[in-house]
Image (cartoon, rainbow, N blue to C red):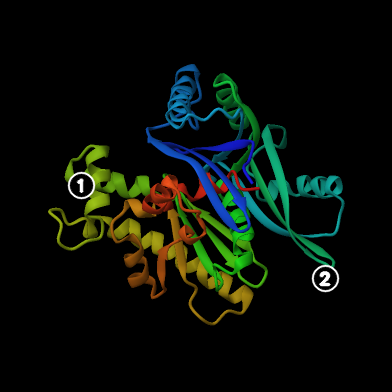
Amino acid sequence: MANDSFCLEFGDAYARVADSSLSNQTIEIDSLAMETKPLTFFTNANETSINEVVKVVDSLINSQKITKKNVNIVIPDTYTYSQILTMPFLKEKELLSAIKYQADQFIPLPLDQAAIDLDILFEDKKNNNLLVLIVATTQNLIDNVARIIEKVGLIPLSIENELSAVGRLINLINQNHSLTQSSLLLNLGSFSTSIYFYNRQKNLISYIHNFKIGFDLFSREVQVNFNLNKQKADEALKSIGFGKNGSLDLGQILKPAFSEFIGEVEKFSISVKEKENITNALPILSFNLSDEIYLFNQSLKTQLGMEAGLLDISTLIRKNNNSEIFKQHQSSYISVVAGNIK
């Protein structure tokens, strides 16, 4: 069943658009596009940076001939603070009050400057508690996103981070058991990386970890060591990456940053396995910018001794012209497709 909305995803170096819907466990994509361009409004919001985003959004919408006015927005995990907490059974208003009371433990913002949202992931009636996802960001960021959307002449229905969108998608699509075991979902962003533990038994994400190593750090290492501009460095990561036969030996240059990256993944994996009494290795399924570094997943597998590959939902996409685009670049489009699946 088609939605009366579409989704926009804003990143630090891109904007993406998707008109997607879910029917009988199958995702239909009516529009899909991306524009690669630095978007600086996250860290430097002013009239110029906001108008730049407006131009990008206008271009994407016009290219896809989208006439819908309702839009859902996805923003990077980098600019949000997320926590999954076990809470007692409470009404939503009481739950929000209880969360705000202890918010200073995980939200490094004054409460009067924060926008806080919560989502009940799981009701454990046996133990009389709730598993709750709390996401917070600055009210300024929410206001700036809303301002961009309104300048384009659209109506914002929701603003959520990548974790919220992808978590909901995984929960919805996995009712047909497309993910057969508990896994680590790895979201390589521009300036940070998020890892989500997908609990197969509960069919939800139950642990999360974000750390400040992202694609941009690997790009800067290549820029500095080989005296390349960002575009050339990004192209080298895409074509050579961790390969051994390239014209540049990027592996040695990337080794210190990648070792730190591996350490964060390993630490999170050990912690989750201890909490969940898991003895086998957890496979890694990556998305977002992980496909922009050649042999990234193979290098994860080699360093960690864990299976690693792309998060693949292509078998759930109904075939049409956009499904082929999605299949070729699905790592990039997971979050924006997820953002319109409710």
Between residue 134 and residue 145, name the one nearer to us.
Answer: 145
Residue, disc 1? 225
User: In front of the other: label 1 or label 2?
Assistant: 2
State which quadrant residue 227 falls in: top left
Mark 1 or mark 2: whose residue is earlier in sequence: 2
Front residue (pair 165, 306) = 165
Which residue is at a point 85% across and 59% down the rendered structure image?
Answer: 89
Instruction: Estimate the x, y position of residue 172 in percent, counting from the top left.
Output: 63, 58
Residue 206 against residue 280 in the figure, above or below: above
**Residue type at tag 2:** Asn
Residue 123 is left or right of residue 30, and the answer is: right
Instruction: Identify which amino acid the numbered label 1 is placed on.
Output: Asn
Could you say where residue 170 lies in the image, as x and y percent from the top left? 59, 59
Pinpoint residue 317: horizontal percent, then vertical percent: 50, 55
Disc on res. 127? 2
Q: Is residue 139 visible?
A: no
Please provide percent x and percent y for residue 97. Answer: 82, 45
Whether 81 is drawn above or below 182: the answer is above
Name the residue located 55 percent from the left edge and 73 percent from the top edge: 180
